């Protein structure tokens, strides 16, 4: 069975240490254990790209042929301000693939489906479509049992992955037709981190879409401000609405972004240079990760079920 990388090796190799000869530094948020790693040995799962819900179970591998071989050339185009359609497609495709096929992305996108099932069950229960539970469960309604947590829906994470794979060009189109900030890190002593989920999120206001912030190399990152007006339009991978600005970051900006990259990592943080302060920095931010947040808004005789994402601690998520 193939060992599929959910974070491309070509991305990870950009974070290799010049003194480790083909390796990078890494630290786990879960236990603060540091280690060195090669790209081929991390961020991989047996048959991760195989999806039984699809007619072509390995369809995503064909898509990756338009992304991974062009990654380094696309970084050069971003640095030299020579961005073209191929570059936009490659970087947008990298982001879309991580969101779709990584364990964190699959975890995050399972929650909306579970929420939709719960909402449907409650509506059907309100119309008397379900009998009361047996005496062993207190004779309660489905709605009561869901509220108590006595029953729950368990969605196979491969299903949202399948949905993401079939619509991955839609995501590429949205990201590629949005506004990008090219973030240049010129502070050699403070390079960017990356992780096992290198697509951090930023929430500015409730009225604005979630921004995606992606470390591409130790000296380069992008901030994508998605154009949500494209969500229900036909994909256009010529990217006519692409816009870009460029920022040279201050040291405080780099610190802020590295904090964000650590907090949004699922577990493992990767970095180029060994620094004494990194373990303490990761320890201060290890309790965070991206969590789906479901909101029920009353609407007419029912309610709207809206799911978004936030960077939360475990304590915040349990409130």
Image (tube, rainbow, N blue to C red):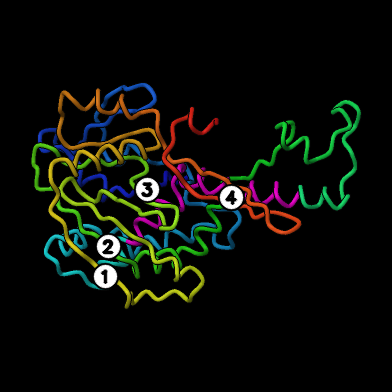
Distance between mark 3 and mark 4 Cα atoms: 17 Å
Residue displayed at 27% across by 73% down: 85
Q: Residues under labels 2 and 4: Cα distance?
A: 27 Å
Q: Are marks 2 and 1 in contact (CB under 8 Å)?
A: yes
Which secondary structure dominates the residues rendered in magenta? helix
Task: Determine the secondary structure under disc 3.
Answer: strand
Residue 180 at x, y percent in the picture = 27, 62
Q: Which residue is mark 2?
A: 180
Question: Mark 3 touching mark 4, by CB under 8 A?
Answer: no
Instruction: Depth check: give the residue in front, 7 or 231.
Output: 231
Say whether disc 3 or disc 1 marks the residue closer to the N-terminus.
3
Q: Mark 4 highlights which residue? A: 112
Can residue 126 be seen in the rendering of this structure? yes
On the image, numbered disc 3 is attached to which residue?
A: 201
Instruction: Give the distance between the C-alpha atoms of the residues marked 1 and 4, in whole angstroms.
Output: 30 Å
Q: Is residue 310 left or right of residue 193?
A: right
Q: Tell which circle, 2 or 4, labels the residue nearer the N-terminal end.
A: 4
Magenta highlight range: 92-121
Task: Residue at 14%, 36% (x, y): give it.
Answer: 21
């Amino acid at each position: 069975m193939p060992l599929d990388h959910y974070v491309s090796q070509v991305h990870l190799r950009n974070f290799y240490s010049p003194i480790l000869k083909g390796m990078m530094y890494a630290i786990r948020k879960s236990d603060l254990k540091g280690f060195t790693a090669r790209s081929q040995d991390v961020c991989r799962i047996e048959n991760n790209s195989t999806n039984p819900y699809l007619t072509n179970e390995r369809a995503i591998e064909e898509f990756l042929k338009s992304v991974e071989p062009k990654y380094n050339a696309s970084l050069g185009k971003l640095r030299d301000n020579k961005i073209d359609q191929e570059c936009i497609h490659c970087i947008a495709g990298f982001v879309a693939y991580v969101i779709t096929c990584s364990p964190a992305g699959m975890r995050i996108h399972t929650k909306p489906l579970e929420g939709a099932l719960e909402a449907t069950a409650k509506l059907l229960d309100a119309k008397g479509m379900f009998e009361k539970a047996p005496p062993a469960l207190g004779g309660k309604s489905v709605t009561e049992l869901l509220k108590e947590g006595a029953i729950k829906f368990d969605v196979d994470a491969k299903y949202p992955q399948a949905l993401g794979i079939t619509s991955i060009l839609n995501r590429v189109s949205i990201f590629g037709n949005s506004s990008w900030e090219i973030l240049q890190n010129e502070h050699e002593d403070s390079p960017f981190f990356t992780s096992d989920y290198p697509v951090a999120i930023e929430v500015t206001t409730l009225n604005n879409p979630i921004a995606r912030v992606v470390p591409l190399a130790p000296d380069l990152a992008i901030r994508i401000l998605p154009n949500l007006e494209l969500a229900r339009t036909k994909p256009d991978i010529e990217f006519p609405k692409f816009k870009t600005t460029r920022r040279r970051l201050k040291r405080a900006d780099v610190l802020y972004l590295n904090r964000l990259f650590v907090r949004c990592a699922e577990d493992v943080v990767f970095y180029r240079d060994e620094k004494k302060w990194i373990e303490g920095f990761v320890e201060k931010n290890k309790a965070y990760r991206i969590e789906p947040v479901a909101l029920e808004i009353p609407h007419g005789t029912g309610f709207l079920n809206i799911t978004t994402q936030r960077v939360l601690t475990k304590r915040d998520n349990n409130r």
